[in-house]
Image (cartoon, rainbow, N blue to C red):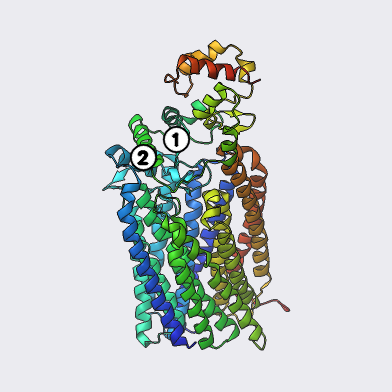
Amino acid sequence: MSNNAAKHLFIWGSVLCFVILIVLTVDTMGKLDSRAPEITAEVDAGKKVWHKYDCIGCHTILGNGSYFAPDMTKATVRKPKGYLKKFIMNPRAIRPDAAMPVLGLSEKEANDLMAFLDWMSKVDTNNWPPPPILAQAAAGKAASAGQVLFQQHDCAACHQIRGIGGVAGPDLTNAGSKQPDPEWHIAHLKDPAALAPDSAMPAFNELSDQELRDLAEYLVTLK
Amino acid sequence: MKYQSQKIALNFYTAAVVLFLVQVLVGIIAALQFMWPDFFILNFNTIRTLHINALVVWLLMGMMGATYYVVPEESETELWSLPLAQFQFWATVLAVTLVVVGYIVMGIFPQANIEIFGTLLLNEGREYIEAPRWADILIVVSVLLFLFNCFMTIMKTKKFTAVQGVLLGGLTFLALMYLPGMFYTKSMVKDQYWWWWVVHLWVEGSWELIAAALLAFMLHKLLGTDVKVLAKWMYIEVGLVMFTGILGLGHHYYWIGTPSYWLWVGGIFSSLEPIPLLLMVWDAFRTTRETRGVVSNRIGLYLTVSHAIFNFVGAGLWGVIHTLPQVNKWTHGTQLTTAHGHLAFYGAYVLLIVAMIYVTVPSIRGAKEFNQSKGYQAFWWMTISMVFIVVTITGAGMVQTYLERLLGLDYVSVKANYNLWFWIFRAIFGVGFLVGVLILVVDVLTLGKKPAASGS
């Protein structure tokens, strides 16, 4: 191949690839709005809060950013919004060993950020992140009605049992030893803050009395 | 050195290596914050912003310095305007200082990052392009002044060589690809779509053009290889870089809310991205093997070939292992990406600029022979440490992928418990890397000033 041929291959090959990229970009831009919910004023304000506090300096979103703190793409799917808001405003009041500092978000900023994260959670990401294989396998092996409810409400997003699950809330490995009374658990599930004043756990009022009892009876078996 | 104005490269090289030192110092703080988040007065996000911005800026300054050296030599004339180059240097230093002060202020007082004229004053909160809009404009002006000066120099003698064509083509492409990062979009998906145009088309596009051009320049200068042969292979390399790299951008569009056809586009083209990098390794070895006679600047050649090898290993191999959507689905956003980022930047660009410094500084200072031992020491301290840093982060990424993504354990517990040893070893090897950089900085500042010791 002559130098001139190699040069022309480089230049025109690059131009061709760039033209294809532009065509794909135009097509993609036309499809993006239908793959995500509408962007309200709160969502936009929340995105600006995300930028203002340089959240991406620690977290990832859509899997991109820093790798110091959890990914925020599906944050409101994995954690209750009430918990997230309290945590973001004062992380160490919720978890004393949290790595996140107090950034001084106002109430409005926190609400807007929740609206943004909620929008983010609903974006069609081609099923990313995929559900963990073991969690799915374990879901098929539930023994009791309470254990099924524990999985359905994704309690493991915040609570660990024998090393598996989140660390946002207390470890439940010995929940039955610490609180052996099912009535305590029922009252706590209905109104966590009444029994634990600084609790960021949301109230599970949507559960029926029978469901609350099933869940409480499962929790007291954890010893 | 044939032309006095080539000396301006020294200013850029000095600023580059000093910023390199800053980058590594804050990198060690960041590594320690993985174990103790409150270790330093500034939070991790500020430290990390400084770490990655220092990297980008020092590499850009290194590329500018290298170009100011290459263009007069290729055009066979003095720079069009030395005062303009000096002004551009000091204006860049001033702008960078202001931006850094802004980051630190924001790190201490997060509320200081207020919105003015629709943009954030101190930090845009977008990875790698955190610099606020006013700084973006200054950066664009600086790069335009730089390009203008280079083009006017070429126009003086109208010697359009292949090396400076690809070099300045790459730099112009680089300047243009900064623009997609300079507007606000309400959608985070569109935000990241355009942000990847900047980040990907820089490091896997325009910067690789610059690397290929500088590789050809260094091989010619060190070995006296026929320019025509070098130019032909350079064109083939950069042609393949663009053919695989432009649409390889698709591997960033798998999971960010973009249509699923990107899984095919990104998967196919990005899998081919290591090919031109392998070709550059072969090019460096072939050229070296075919050379007859003694190479006086052995450390320069050593670094040039090392750059080609680690460009292939870091950017090529460490990238291709997680580029297929089937794999990336599980590894995306884990420490494996950090491992790839570290080795890719080190191999492709850190060693490139360091090699360029060792190839050109002795000639700028008029030293025919110089003491090369410190250069080897710096290289081995940095390279061994970086390899181990990358091994530890790769281990952390594998553990994270398995425990968090496959088994469903919580991010925080994996980071705090299961990966703790990796963080400890990463920090220790970080100190080793710092030793190498300290040797490098001292050597670059004194290189060629003293007569060479006998036998060196």
In the picture of the structure, the residue carrying the numbered disc 1 is: A77
Q: How many marks?
A: 2
**Frontmost residue, B40 versus B385:** B385
Whole-percent x and y of residue B12? 47, 68
Q: Are marks 2 and 1 on the same chain?
A: yes
At x 37%, y 73%, the residue is A15
Q: Nearer the viewer, residue A208 or B294?
A: A208
Q: Is residue B211 above or below residue B77?
A: above
For mark 2, name the chain. Answer: A
Query: How many residues crowd around disc 1 within 10 Å: few (fewer than 14), some, or many (20 or more)?
Result: some
Instruction: Report the chain holding disc 1.
Output: A
- Residue at image location 54% in from the left, 41% down from the top: B40
Residue designated by label 2: A119
In the rendering, at what x and y percent does residue B326 appear? Answer: 54, 54
Relative placement, left or right, of B275 versus B188 is right
Location of the C terminus of chain A (image quadrant):
top right
Q: Amino acid at mark 1?
A: Val
